[in-house]
Every structure is written in C-alpha cells, then in structure tokens.
Image (cartoon, rainbow, N blue to C red):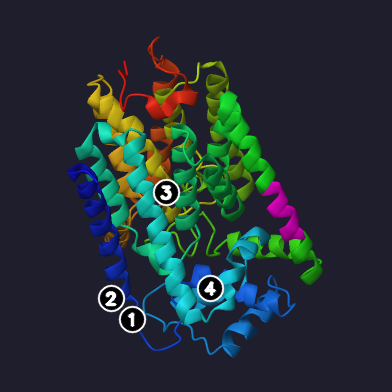
Amino acid sequence: MTAGQTKRIAVILLCVSFSALLNWALRRGPGNTIHTVDFAEIYYGDRCALQHQDPYDPGTVLREFLAQGGKFPPDVPGKPISDSKVAQIVLSNSVNLPTSFFLVLPLALLPWSITAYLWVWLSVLLLAVAAWLVWDLGAGASPAIWAWLAGFLLSNSQQLIATGNVAGAAVGLCIIAVWCFLKNRFVLAGVVLLAFSLLLKPHDAGFIWLYFLLAGGALRKRALQTLAVTAVLGLCTFAWISRISPHWYPELHRNIAFEVARGGIDDPGPTGAHQNTPAPVIDLQAAISVFKDDAGSYNIVSYLVIGVLILAWIVVVLRKRPSPQGALFALAPVAALTLLPVYHRPYDAKLLLLTLPACALLWAAKAPRRWIALALTAAAIFITSDIPLAMDVALGQSLSLSTNTFAGKLATVLLLRPAPLILLAVGCFYLWVYVRYEPPADLPPLADSSTAPAAAAAT
C-alpha cells in the first residue's frame, strides 16, 4: 500500500468516524428507545413477515415493536411534530418495496440491539469504500478537491446514521458497482451489487443503471446481467410477500399516500412536517410548491423539467463515442438530476460522490469551467449536508418570511429551500460539459478503461 493510499484511507476513516461518534453521543438514551427508525421500519416488518403477518399493516407492525419491548423517543418541546409521533408513523407505515424486506431478512433473525449497529456500520463501511473508489475513478486527479468535498460529505452523515436509512447502503453499493464496471474488475460482483442497490432504492440507482444500458458494448452486457439478477430476486420477493400479504400493493400505496398527504412527514409542500427540519425533502417539488402548493401542479412541472433534461441526456449518451472519461462526465449530471423528479432526502444526496471525478478532471485540466464546476459541486454537497441544513433551520426560525407575495416566496426558496435549485444547476452544468466533451482520438475504448490514464484533457 502506497503512502497516498494510506492517506486516502485515513481521511475517509476520520470523516466517517466523526459522524459515527457524534451520532453515538447524541443518541444515547434509555434502553430499548428506538433511534434508527428508518431501518426499524424494515426490521420489524421482516419480524412480522417471519411470523406470516402483514408487514404493510400499521397495527401489526406496531404491536410487534411493542411486544419486543421497543420504546419511542421522548418528545422535545417546541417541535411542530414530536419525535415520538414521527417515529411511530415511520415505523408502522412501511413505504419500502418488498425487495427491501427480502434483502434485509437475514438481519431480522438477530436481536434488534445487535442488528441496528450492524446495519449502521455496514452502511458506513459501504459509503467509505465508495468514497475511496471515487478517487480511483478520476477524483484523484485533484487530490485536494477530493479530500475537501468527499471529506465534508462523509463527515456530515449524522442524519443517515441516526435514521439507518437504506440510502447509505444503496448509494454505496451503486458507486462500488460503477467502479467495477468502468474499471472492468470484479464485474460479476458489480452486477450483484448494482442489483442490490436497485432492489433497495431504484430511484437512487435507476438512472445510473440506465447509463450502462445506453452506453453499449460490454457495459450494456453488464446492465442486462444486472437486470436479470434484479428480475430474479424481484420475482422471488413478490412470490414470497404475496403469500404473506396478498394485498401488499394497495397497502403500500395507502401508506405512501398517507405520508405525502398535505402536512404529512413526506409532504414537499410548505406545510410538510419535515420541511423545517435538518432532513427536508429535496426534490424539485419542494421548491415549486412554495409558489403553488398543489400536488397535481408541482408534480407535473417537476416531471416535465427533469424529463426534458433526462431525455436530452439520453440522446447525448446514445450519440457520444463511449470513453472512460466520457463515462464520468455522463454520470455526473444524472447523479444530481436523479434526486429531483421524485421523493428524496439529504441522505440520498450522498450520490453526489459521483460528481467528484468530473469536477476533479476539469480542475486538473485547468479548463475555463473549473471554477464553475468547483463552486456548483461544493454548493450542492454543502447545502445537502447535515450541519449546514441545521444552520438553515436556525436561519428560518430567525427570519419572518411571508409567502403571500412573489418576493417572499422567492426569498423562501433561495434562503430556506435552495437544495433543489442548486441540484438542478449542477445537473444542467455537467450535462452541458458532457455535450461539449470529445474524447481524444488516442484514448483507449471504454472496455479497456482499467488501463486508461487517470485524467484526460477536458477542453
């Protein structure tokens, strides 16, 4: 192991340990008090399924949780919705796909006190490995850029660790699979890992998989293999869950509708219970809803805006000659855009690790756009990180912004809900860079990317 590799590992471990230790200090409390509630939703759903009980029925899951001696966190005065109420809603109203239950099922055989910590550290480990591999994908072209941005992103993972959300595992698995495919190493492992990521959170990994399908050649083969593994595991899952819960689909739809309803914990509108917390909804609807709080309107606008950009991205991918660096410039815009059309929270934004190779390559090549790349990438990571989000909540409490006027609505979006707009800017910028990028004529084909140079001129 070289000195450079040792330093990279040390930086990652320090950043991840900071989040883990801070989270541990904050979440100490009475025995059996639930903390990683997002993961608990899957764990206790699996416990119900093991007893042939419906994991999508709120009453059944709640009874299982209480029977195991579980306790909800105490309420904190002054919050618009209590921690206890949020935990109860999240725990009992499962909005995860059956495939999440299937993948986590082995962990449900263990006691909660053991499983919760195993899951948290598994998520942390996967993200750390993903950040380390991002260096090898191209971010190592500018070590300082990688160290500052990846380090800041990882050190702001308290919310992810605190909730135990599957986004940590899904994003980590996805990025590791990207490295396997682009470097043409451990490709079968990459196929399985990307399939697991799709099964956990298809709205995080879906467009990443689509790139490999569109890129053609060996990468398309990997995408089709991933699809086959995903389909087999998915069919096994649906056969299993349908025996336990024949009406799981309408029940899942009901649970989602309950949480995204006006004032619900997943409502992206101004009255959403989580919109003034350090874990707000960050999709484009969260910004548009300030101007028109109508789900039918802000959903359509979001789908149209992102749909047009994704369609443009697809056309460019199909027309471009595949190349190692071209793949990095292709993945950067979609890593940001995938967070915008449907429900996402800041912990899903760890996918922004995939923008670092493109940013680092532009910086190393001294391209005129390097300052824009750095500013937008840093802003996206900063504004979706835990500490800045907590500061933004404090700012919102100190300001008295009225949404009765257009100026007040605009100020609300720019000051209190900037994440969707910054992510949109990042996606548009890297899409523009990808459109203009032409690989050098002597660059090896994508299938030989494992032997390609670490950086290429990004004019």
Please provide percent x and percent y for residue 423.
41, 40
- The amino acid type found where label 3 is placed reads Ala
Label 4, secondary structure: give it: helix
Q: Mark 4: few, some, or many residues within 10 Å (few <14, many ≥20)?
A: many
Percent x, y of residue 149 = 27, 44
State the extent of the magenta-drawn residues as a range: 230-238
Residue 195: image location, x then y, percent: 59, 48
Secondary structure, mark 3, is helix
Total marks shown come to 4
Quarter of the image for residue 50 reads bottom right
Look at the picture and state if 438 lies above or below 241.
above
- Marked residue nearer the N-terminal end (4 or 1): 1
Residue annotated with mark 4: 40
Residue shown at 52%/86% (left/top)?
A: 70
Side of 202 where 354 appears, left or right: left
Q: Earlier in the sequence, mark 2 or mark 3?
A: 2
Q: Which mark is first along the chain, 3 or 4?
A: 4
For badge 4, the amino acid type reads Ala
**Residue that badge 2 annotates:** 25
The quadrant of the image that shows the C terminus is top left
Give the residue type that dot 2 points to: Ala
Q: Earlier in the sequence, mark 3 or mark 1?
A: 1
Q: Is residue 442 magenta?
A: no
- The answer to whether marks 1 and 2 mark residues whose Cβ atoms lie closer than 8 Å is yes
Question: Is 334 rendered above or below residue 399?
Answer: above
* Nearer the observer, 415 or 226: 226
Q: Secondary structure at mark 2?
A: helix
The three-letter code of the residue at mark 1 reads: Arg
Residue drawn where x is 27% and y is 57% of the image? 13
Residue 97, compared with residue 216, is above or below; it is below
Instruction: Compute the Cα span from label 4 to label 1.
Output: 17 Å
The circle on residue 349 is: 3
